[in-house]
């Protein structure tokens, strides 16, 4: 089935450690996104990529890094520089950039807890 | 900073009733207004969307009403069912922000049987 797969679903990390969240899509979508979701807040954009080997910072990119070496994959690294990393992270994709289509397709999320 | 304000934060409706969620925006450079539905432990999914040249859009039991002059839009769920219990997010696509979505804070809807 086509879709977006995020892993792991749950992740615990000690302070000072980097952690990488995986996002893979088999929808053949050009654009991919990472959002952070905190209770009582809307989704906030961390990074997005509209083509392979290119990505742009979103509203809250500090303390995060990404890569887009393959069309299907857009991993997110939460670095030790992120001051408050405990959150629910959502990966999404769209067929082309959001200027062409407004619909985002989301994965099921990864919940990161920093101990 | 562009904002989308969503209310109420939570809502309880009896089965068969009408659920109404409201959003207001502060920037006129938005060109597309989607609503997403999110069940616990899942990612959001597009429910219905509207463009500002239309005042109302209906899909089944779900209707978006759009008031361009007031910069407000709302989601109405008719004949609400327990299966509609979820968190609902409104969003607005910013023409001035590379067409990225600005999200409301979400409304947790509970439909009581």
Image: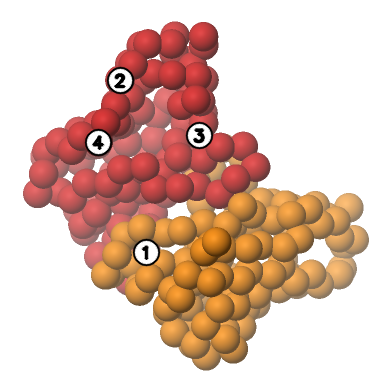
Chain colours: A orange, B red
What residue would you read off at disc 1?
A: B100
> What mark, if any, has residue B87 been given in the picture?
3
Circles 4 and 3 on the same subunit = yes
Q: Position of residue A67 (x, y in %)?
A: 61, 83
In the figure, B39 relative to A27: above or below?
above
Q: Secondary structure at mark 4?
A: strand
What residue would you read off at disc 4?
A: B59
Foreground label between 4 and 3: 4
Is residue A47 visible in the rendered image? The answer is: no
Q: Position of residue B43 (x, y in %)?
A: 55, 49
Name which of mark 4 and mark 3 comes first in the sequence.
Answer: 4
Circles 4 and 1 on the same subunit = yes
In 3D space, how far apart are the residues under numbered discs 4 and 3 (Cα atoms)? 18 Å
> What mark, if any, has residue A106 been given in the picture?
none
User: Residue placed at 65% from the left, 42% from the top?
Assistant: B41
Name which of mark 4 and mark 2 comes first in the sequence.
Answer: 4
What residue would you read off at disc 2?
A: B78
Name which of mark 3 and mark 1 comes first in the sequence.
Answer: 3
């Amino acid at each position: 089935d086509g879709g977006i797969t995020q892993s792991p679903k749950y992740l615990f990390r000690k302070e000072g450690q980097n952690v990488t969240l995986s996002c893979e899509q088999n929808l053949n979508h050009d654009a991919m996104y990472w959002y952070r979701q905190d209770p009582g807040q809307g989704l906030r954009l961390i990074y997005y990529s509209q083509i392979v080997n290119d990505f742009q910072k979103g509203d809250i990119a500090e303390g995060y890094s990404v890569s887009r070496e393959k069309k299907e994959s857009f991993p997110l690294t939460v670095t030790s520089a992120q001051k408050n990393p405990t959150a629910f992270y959502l990966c999404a994709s769209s067929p082309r950039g959001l200027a062409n289509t407004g619909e985002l397709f989301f994965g099921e999320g990864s919940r990161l807890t920093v101990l | 900073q562009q904002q989308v304000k969503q209310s109420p934060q939570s809502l309880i409706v009896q089965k068969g009733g009408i659920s109404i969620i409201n959003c207001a925006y502060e920037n006129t450079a938005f060109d597309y207004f989607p609503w997403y539905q999110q069940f616990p432990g899942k990612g959001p999914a597009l429910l219905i969307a509207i463009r500002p040249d239309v005042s109302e859009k209906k899909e089944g039991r779900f209707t978006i009403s759009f008031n361009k002059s007031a910069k407000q839009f709302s989601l109405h769920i008719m004949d609400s069912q327990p299966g509609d219990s979820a968190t609902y997010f409104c969003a607005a696509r910013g023409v001035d922000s590379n067409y990225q979505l600005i999200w409301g804070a979400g409304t947790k809807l509970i439909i009581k049987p």
